[in-house]
Image: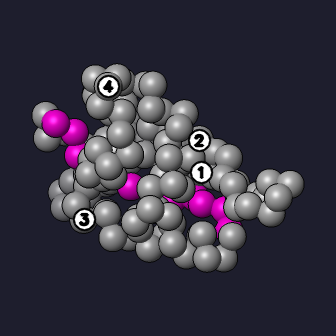
Amino acid sequence: MVKILLILRRAFDCLLHERCVFRMHPLENKLELIFQRIHPDDREPVRQTIDRGFEARANLDFEHRLLMPDCSVKYLHPLARAGETSSGTLEYVGTVMDVTERKRAEKERDCSRYKRILRT
């Protein structure tokens, strides 16, 4: 768990100050809270993805959902490049993008397609 939180910290560092994404009070910016916000159905796949990336010293590139306090869902796309420090320690540098609007647009597009198919 410590390994996962360390990687999540690096992946989410850029968003810790963005209250609009996590909707947290600044004092609540703790890694445990971020991990708890990951949608329950996504927690284990996220953990496995991070573990595999860490073991292989590979880049991270995946999407997952956050369950917000108001029960809304946000979609995030962490993207982190694996590298080594001068001492040989694994380090991730990356970003996390909020892709919620893209996911909503994709869902609307898919629903429209299904409705057209059902009408014919």
Query: Who comes first in sequence, dot 3 or dot 2?
Result: 3
Residue 62 appears at what percent x and percent y? 51, 59
In the rendered image of this protein, does residue 48 appear above or below residue 96?
below
Q: Which residue is at the front of the view, 11 or 79?
A: 11
**Circle 3 crowding by C-alpha within 10 Å: few under 14, some 14–19, many from 20:** few
**Circle 4 crowding by C-alpha within 10 Å: few under 14, some 14–19, many from 20:** few
Image label count: 4
Query: Who comes first in sequence, dot 4 or dot 1?
Result: 4
Secondary structure under tag 1 reads strand
Secondary structure under tag 4 reads helix
Is residue 65 visible from the viewing direction of this image? no
* Residue 116: in magenta span: no
Mark 4 and mark 1: Cα distance apart in space: 25 Å
Q: Which mark is residue 41?
A: 3
**Residue that numbered label 1 is attached to:** 79
**Residue that numbered label 4 is attached to:** 27
Quarter assignment of residue 113: bottom left
Residue 39 appears at what percent x and percent y? 26, 55
Secondary structure under tag 3 reads helix
Mark 2 and mark 4: Cα distance apart in space: 22 Å
**Residue that numbered label 2 is attached to:** 95
Mark 4 and mark 3: Cα distance apart in space: 27 Å
- Which amino acid type corresponds to the residue marked 2 in the rendered image? Thr
Residue at the left extreme of this rendering: 70
Which residue appears at 40% of the width and 66% of the height? 1
